[in-house]
């Protein structure tokens, strides 16, 4: 089942992903429990809101918002489909094959997740828009990350990160350290340029 993520059809609905598929994936996550949740808002036809909590190393998904909330991600149903089951997934697979890497769900069990750091992220205010530019299909996939459980502002982000889809995939596949990712020269940041740094610093337990 390690390649289940890459084999899902483009017709997969958000409700099926969040309600049935994601909880059953053989994810390798840190063996701990976090009180804060990560909320996903999928807008448009077939959308909805789902909260994700890490409990004893497993993802528990609940419809609606479950607090306290660390982050909220807002994405359209169309871009959600392309991200997980369509163009972005396909390009990700192409880059992995080009780099000779396995088509498998990454092992995240050793990620240094600290509950206090997650709480610090929840204390940041602001919305960060991430725009993934797909040159081949002449499209840009947008997802807005709002810190904390307050109102989201996907159309009025405080900061925007624009990056070429292939560049980002290659950087992530190469396990580029977070701060080096921001300073790689591949990301174009506008608006409140300190917001991504504050968020990353909080997640890693550092002072921005």
Image (tube, rainbow, N blue to C red):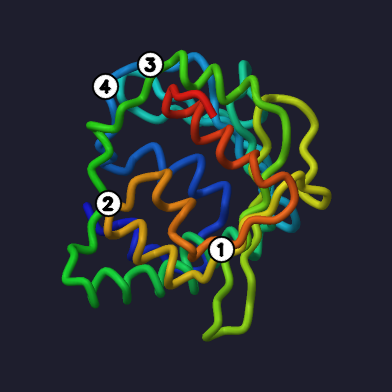
Ranked by sequence position, the earlier of labels 4 and 1 is 4
Task: Using residue 83 as the reference point, say whether residue 91 is left or right of it.
Answer: left
Q: Which residue is drawn at 60% across and 32% down?
A: 71
Q: What element carries label 2?
A: loop
Residue topped by disc 4: 31
> Real-space Cα distance between discs 2 and 4?
17 Å
Circle 1 residues within 10 Å: few <14, some 14–19, many ≥20:
many
Q: Residue at x 73, y 35 (%)?
A: 126
> Real-space Cα distance between discs 3 and 1?
29 Å
Foreground of the two, 98 or 90: 98
Q: Residue 89: x percent and y percent?
A: 42, 67
Q: Is mark 1 on a helix, strand or loop?
A: helix
Q: Is mark 4 on a helix, strand or loop?
A: loop
Circle 2 residues within 10 Å: few <14, some 14–19, many ≥20:
some
Determine whether label 4 and label 1 are within 8 Å by CB. no
Residue topped by disc 2: 105
Mark 2 vs mark 1, foreground winner is 2
Q: Which image quarter holds the C terminus?
A: top right
Mark 3 vs mark 1, foreground winner is 3
Residue topped by disc 1: 81
Circle 3 residues within 10 Å: few <14, some 14–19, many ≥20:
some
Q: Residue 78: x percent and y percent?
A: 65, 65
Ranked by sequence position, the earlier of labels 2 and 1 is 1
Determine whether label 2 and label 4 are within 8 Å by CB. no
Q: Residue at x 83, y 49 (%)?
A: 156
Q: Residue 171: x percent and y percent?
A: 36, 61
> Real-space Cα distance between discs 4 and 1?
29 Å
> Real-space Cα distance between discs 2 and 3?
21 Å
Circle 4 residues within 10 Å: few <14, some 14–19, many ≥20:
few
- Residue 33's disc number: 3
Q: Is residue 167 above or below residue 21?
A: below
Which quarter of the figure has residue 7? bottom left
């Amino acid at each position: 089942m390690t390649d289940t993520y890459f084999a899902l059809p483009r017709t997969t609905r958000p409700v099926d992903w969040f309600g049935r598929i994601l909880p059953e994936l053989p994810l390798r996550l840190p063996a701990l429990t976090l009180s804060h949740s990560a909320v996903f808002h999928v807008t448009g036809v077939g959308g909805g809101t789902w909260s994700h909590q890490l409990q004893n190393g497993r993802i528990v998904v609940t419809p609606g918002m479950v607090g306290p909330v660390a982050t909220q991600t807002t994405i359209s149903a169309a871009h959600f489909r392309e991200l997980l089951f369509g163009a972005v997934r396909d390009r990700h697979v192409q880059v992995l094959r080009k780099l000779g890497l396995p088509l498998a769900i990454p092992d995240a069990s050793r990620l240094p997740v600290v509950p206090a750091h997650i709480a610090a992220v929840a204390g940041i205010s602001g919305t960060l828009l991430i725009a993934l530019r797909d040159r081949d299909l002449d499209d840009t996939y947008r997802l807005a990350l709002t810190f904390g459980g307050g109102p989201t502002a996907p159309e009025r982000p405080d900061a925007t990160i624009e990056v070429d889809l292939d560049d980002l995939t290659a950087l992530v596949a190469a396990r580029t350290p977070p701060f080096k990712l921001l300073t790689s020269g591949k990301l174009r940041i506008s608006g409140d340029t300190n917001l991504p740094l504050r968020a990353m610093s909080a997640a890693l337990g550092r002072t921005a």
